[in-house]
Image (cartoon, rainbow, N blue to C red):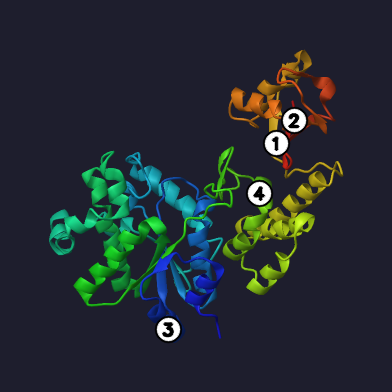
């Protein structure tokens, strides 16, 4: 018999708050449940900040229930004000459709979305055809403006300004839940902690219009032990798209997890049994790296496949243990050989090679002793790099203790 979905999420640290937890736990033991999470297509790729909801849907399917991954093509036309200090840029329908296709392909890597075991839907299909007057009459009358003003996503924006179109977002998200309840027997909506007000609004709408019982569940905001928002690096977001963040860079992100976060991240971002996770994380000191390697390998396999994970692990081991072996998995950049023949200052090379975003960042890294070239530390930001520094046709840079980049001359 499959594990109880609610208990699985609770044990693995997914749940921030939920409505009627005891009743929900019992419900998942009694019958097959459909549950949904929305993903707004504001970019053509999701990033690791979306992994908690994605993994929750995957666990839902693994425990015998039906996940609904809802691409918010319709709501993206408005923009969710939650967690935002200003209004999102308005995207064209063509851009939203393009982004939605990218999200669909990514979500399908984590679960089966074949229309039976799992559903992949786009709310553009039912939101765009809505008649505004009928919508206000049938749906809007169930919402109190006073209550909507108490929602965290609204309160945070009142000082800086909240547009009327964004203010309507809660109505549309609640309508999504009602639509899925009516057409797909969906009884649970899940989302980030900032979605609690919107989720509760949907539950209330279902009760008012259908006399039905629905449930809500939110996930905690994941921050590292150092207090930083999980998923951010010096280079920006860690994307699930291999063209935006290579499998090697993805692997390195996870293997660089802080020691105190390894147990929690193994529970949240892999499917390993909790007993195995506890066994792995009993280790301390240098041995904790083996647990980090498992975390990096498992997460990379889930997102990019076994072959990519094996290549990333091999490259990481070779570089970390100083075996001097090169690999195609290391991030690559190309640099004109004619410039190297004349000599180029290293801080400019780091920027032009895409290793650093700005010249000041490059100078700062070098000044802190955080840059090495071919195993030799760079001590001056204006040190000249030339063809004499090439090993074969490439330069291997090490940034900090664990990041490697290769620049190839052409």
* Residue 131 visible (yes or no): no
Mark 1 to mark 3 CA distance (whole Å): 52 Å
Q: Residue furthest top?
A: 342
Considering depth in this image, is 322 or 379 the residue closer to the camera? 379
Element under label 4? helix
Instruction: Return the residue nearer the eye: 112 or 12.
Output: 12
- Category of crowding for the residue at label 3, using alpha-carbon neighbours closer than 10 angstroms: few (below 14), some (14–19), many (at least 20): few
Pinpoint residue 347: horizontal percent, then vertical percent: 68, 22
Q: Which residue is mark 2?
A: 408
Which image quadrant: the C terminus?
A: top right
Query: Can the viewer see residue 221?
Result: yes
Whichever of callouts 1 and 4 sits on the residue coming sooner in the sequence is 4
Circle 1 sits on which residue?
Answer: 332
Marks 1 & 2, CB-CB < 8 Å contact: yes
* Residue reaching furthest to the right: 323
Mark toward the viewer: 2 or 3: 3
Q: Are marks 2 and 3 in contact (CB under 8 Å)?
A: no
Which residue shows up at 28% across the image and 55% down it?
151
| Residue at image mark 3 | 26
Q: CA distance from mark 1 to mark 4?
A: 12 Å
Q: Earlier in the sequence, mark 3 or mark 4?
A: 3
Expressed as whole percent of the image width and height from the top left, the position of residue 239 reads: 55, 47
Q: Where does the image place residue 339, in percent across and percent down from the top left? A: 72, 17
Vertical position of residue 340 compared to residue 277: above or below: above
Q: CA distance from mark 3 to mark 4?
A: 40 Å
Q: Secondary structure at mark 2?
A: strand
| 240 up-or-down from 11: above or below | above
Q: Quadrant of residue 301?
A: bottom right
Residue named by callout 4: 247
Q: CA distance from mark 1 to mark 2?
A: 7 Å
């Amino acid at each position: 018999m499959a594990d109880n979905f609610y208990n699985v999420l609770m044990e693995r640290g997914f749940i921030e708050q939920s409505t009627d937890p005891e009743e929900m736990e019992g419900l998942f033991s009694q019958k097959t449940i459909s549950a949904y999470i929305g993903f707004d297509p504001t970019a053509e790729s999701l990033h690791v900040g979306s992994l908690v909801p994605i993994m929750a849907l995957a666990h839902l399917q693994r425990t015998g229930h039906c996940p609904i991954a809802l691409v918010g093509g319709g709501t993206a036309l408005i923009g969710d004000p939650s967690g935002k200090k200003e209004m999102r840029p308005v995207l064209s329908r063509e851009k939203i459709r393009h982004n939605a296709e990218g999200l669909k392909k990514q979500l399908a890597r984590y679960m089966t979305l074949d229309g039976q075991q799992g559903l992949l839907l786009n709310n553009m299909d039912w939101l765009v055809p809505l008649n505004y007057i009928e919508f206000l009459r049938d749906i809007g009358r169930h919402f109190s403006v006073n209550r909507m003003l108490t929602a965290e996503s609204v309160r945070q924006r009142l000082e800086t300004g909240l547009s009327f179109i964004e203010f309507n977002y809660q109505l549309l998200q609640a309508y999504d839940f009602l639509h899925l309840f009516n057409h797909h027997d969906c009884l649970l909506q899940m989302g980030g902690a900032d979605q609690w007000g919107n989720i509760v609004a949907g539950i209330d709408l279902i009760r008012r219009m259908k006399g039905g019982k629905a449930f809500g569940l939110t996930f905690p905001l994941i921050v590292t032990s150092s207090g930083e928002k999980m998923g951010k690096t010096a280079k920006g977001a860690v994307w699930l798209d291999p063209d935006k963040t290579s499998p090697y860079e993805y692997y390195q992100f996870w293997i660089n997890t802080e020691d105190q976060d390894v147990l929690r991240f193994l529970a949240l971002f892999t499917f390993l049994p909790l007993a195995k996770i506890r066994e792995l994380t009993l280790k301390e000191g240098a041995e904790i790296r083996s647990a980090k390697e498992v975390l990096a390998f498992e997460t990379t396999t889930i997102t990019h496949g076994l072959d990519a994970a094996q290549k990333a692990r091999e490259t990481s081991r070779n570089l970390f243990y100083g075996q001097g072996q090169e690999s195609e998995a290391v991030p690559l950049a190309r640099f004109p050989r004619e410039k190297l023949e004349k000599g180029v200052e290293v801080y400019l090379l780091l920027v032009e090679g895409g290793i650093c975003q700005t010249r000041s960042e490059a100078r700062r890294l070098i000044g802190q002793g955080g840059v090495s070239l071919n195993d030799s530390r760079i001590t001056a930001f204006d040190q000249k790099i030339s063809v004499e520094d090439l090993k074969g046709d490439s330069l291997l840079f090490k940034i900090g203790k664990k990041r490697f980049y290769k620049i190839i001359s052409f």
